[in-house]
Image (cartoon, rainbow, N blue to C red):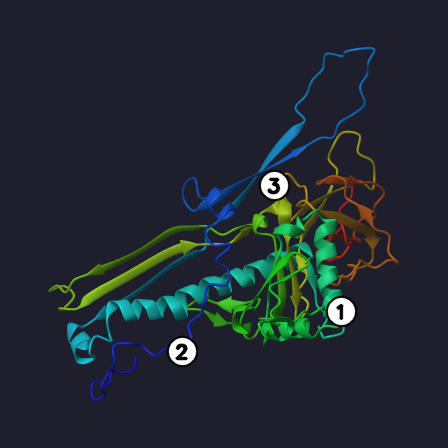
Amino acid sequence: MANLNYAAQYGQELANAYPYLSYYGDLWNQGNSRRFRPLRGKTVYIPTMTVTGAHAVNRDSINGNFSRNFDLNWQACDLQMDREWDTLVDPMDMDETNEVATIANITRTFNEFQKVPEMDAYMAAKLAGFASAFGGVATTSPDASNILTLWDNALAYMTNQRVNRDRVRCKMIPSVYKLLKEATGISRFIEVTNGIQAVDRNIAKLDGVLIQEVPEDLMKTAYTFTNGWVIDEAHAAQIKMLFYDPEAIAAPVVYETSMMSAPTAQSKGKYLYYERYYYDVFCLNQRQAGVYALLGSAPSLGSLTVTSAANAATGATAGDSVITVTGNEIWSTGAPVEGTKLLYCADENSAVSITYGAVPNAEKTWVEMTANPLTVAGLTGSKVITVVLVNAQTGYAIAEGHATQVVTV
């Protein structure tokens, strides 16, 4: 830390760089963020429910059999971001800087340049990760001729997965916002009042979607948070547009406190300031389609763990293999998260090559896994089975895994 310059004449007002705003204030501790909070410890449990469909009425009989036609799942999410910051302030620093080096000025600077942008950087990276994990990603480079097409594609994707457009919001970097203003097909109106011509080219809302510009450094896919927030230049891609439904996100701030101690002998006559805040960002598993991103480069393919074991059940036949798939996008019940499905291609000499965001190789035979674990018959031992998780609506690959086939002999 640089020494304070006592030789200079200080003013009481700081002339810091332009501060960071909170660009995701609509998500932090709002809506779902207040509803879904830890019940105990550091884990947030988010409940989801599924029900069966209706069936035809039999007017001629009552079989007397009734069953439970709903099921509950619990999405367990552990909070990760437990943060703290502290500083000492010597009373002589306050006096000799004409009350510039005060707790108020120091903490305001910390909040404007560290705490607020750190939380927003974390939010942006997490939202981009949710979009990538579900397959809601495009990587086409935008320009003035295609920006509206990319916009329409994003909204069509979300509408096809029943996302309420009236709730959708969009963050975008300034260069993309500029393209949107230059786009062919955008209508502009100029209002002249009392002979004074005022031209406002802001686009605050398009097709019912609220738009906000966000600085590029707060729209990256990867950061390190070892000391403050730093862009992970080796792994970060630029987020160009980020669409989201607030009802798909939970961003609880479960603990936030600040304390100040007056000078004591223990602190060697200095003021001591301490701040701690505890937060995280989660996506509801049944609403992952509520996040969509336009990225500068394609994300990496996710990983599935696939195991193959001989069928030990009574009556098993030669060639039977029990295939089990686990991974971040697979429920503990074995079902893939809502809006996705598992496909497998078996009896290959090697693993089938899969590309993120592309439909699996059409020259291969892909079969949907209707259960997990699933017993597959007629396989050959020592050959390879490849399993891919795809977006059920687009068919695009999200994650992949493979295993050497072990069969009943």
Amino acid at the residue labelled 1: Gly
Residue 125: x and y, percent? 55, 63
Rendered view: 4 above or below 347? below
**Sequence order check, earlier mark of 3 and 1:** 1
Q: Which of marks 2 and 3 is in front?
A: 2
* Cα distance in 3D space between marks 3 and 1: 48 Å
Q: Name the side, left or right, on which 87 lies relative to 153.
A: left
Q: What element carries label 3?
A: loop
- List the residue tagged with mark 2: 17
Residue at 55 percent across and 73 percent down: it is 216
Question: In the picture provided, is 47 more to the left or to the right than 354?
Answer: left
Asked if labels 3 and 2 touch by Cβ distance under 8 angstroms, the answer is: no
Q: Is residue 382 visible?
A: yes
Mark 2 belongs to which amino acid? Ala
Q: In this view, does 70 lie above or below 272?
A: above
Q: Residue 137's quadrant in the figure? A: bottom right
In this rendering, would 259 be left or right of 140?
A: left
Q: Nearer the viewer, residue 11 or 375?
A: 11
Query: How far across and down, in percent of the image, does residue 58 sit?
Result: 82, 16
Distance between the alpha carbons at the discs numbered 2 and 3 = 49 Å
The residue where tag 3 is placed is 332
Q: Quadrant of residue 188?
A: bottom right
Tell me if mark 2 has few (under 14), some (14-19) or many (20+) residues whose alpha carbon lies within 10 angstroms of its own.
few
Instruction: Provide residue 130's location: percent of width, then percent of height.
Output: 61, 56
Vertical relation: 87 (above or below) 365: below
- The N terminus appears in which quarter of the rendering? bottom left
Residue 232 in view in this figure: no
Labelled disc at residue 212: none
Q: What element carries label 2?
A: loop
Q: Residue at image x 21%, y 71%?
A: 89
User: Which numbered disc, 1 or 2, marks the residue that appears first in the sequence?
Assistant: 2
Q: In this view, does 197 lie to the left or right of 30?
A: right
